[in-house]
Amino acid sequence: MAQNNQNGKMSREEAGRKGGEATSKNHDQEFYQEIGSKGGEATSKNHDKDFYQEIGSKGGEATSKSHDREFYQEIGREGGSARGNSDGNDDQDGKMSREEAGRKGGQARSRNRKN
C-alpha cells in the first residue's frame, strides 16, 4: 500500500521499498555479492586504517550495549570450538596462534578495564 505525501506523490520510503523489491526480483545472490565486493573495494580505497578502527569501535560498543555476558560466552565457545577443529598449523596458514590470540585478548581486556 503506497503511502502518499501531501502532494499525492509516493514517499521516498515507499519508492525505495518498491525499487528494492523490483531489484530483488530481477537479480540473484551473485549480483548482490558482486556489488557488495565492488563497494568494499571502493570503500577501502577511500578510507584509511583509522576509519576502520573507528567504525569497529562503534560497532563493538553498540554490540556490548545490546548483548549480555552469556552472548559473549557462547560466541567464545563457538569460536574456540571452531579453532580447536583446525589442523594446528597456525603459523603456516597466516593465522595467529592460540597463545598469541590469548595474549592479545588479555592485553586488550586489561587496557579496557583501566579506561
Image (cartoon, grey):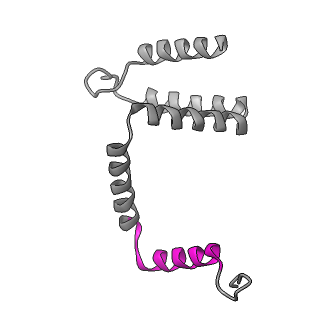
- Locate residue 55 relative to residue 90 in the image: left or right: right
Q: Which residues are magenta?
A: 11-29
Q: Residue at x 32, y 49 (%)?
A: 41
- Quadrant location, the C terminus: top right
Outermost residue on the left side: it is 92
Give the image quarter of residue 52: top left
Query: Which part of the image, by quadrant, shows the N terminus?
Result: bottom right
Where is residue 62? Give x, y as percent: 65, 38
Q: Nearer the viewer, residue 41 or 85?
A: 41
Percent across and percent down for residue 103 are 48, 12
Position of 112 relative to 72 (above/below)? above
Magenta-colored stretch includes residue 78: no
Q: Nearer the viewer, residue 11 or 63?
A: 11
User: What residue is rendered at 58% in x and 38% in y?
Assistant: 59
Quarter location, residue 83: top left
Q: Residue at x 32, y 44 (%)?
A: 45
28 lies above or below 79 = below
Q: In screen coordinates, is 69 left or right of 57?
A: right
Q: In the visual, does 105 lie left or right of 34?
A: right
Q: Is residue 13 above or below residue 69?
A: below
User: For the view shown, which residue lies furthest in the bottom direction?
Assistant: 8
The x and y percentages for residue 69 are 71, 29
Q: Number of callouts in the render?
A: 0
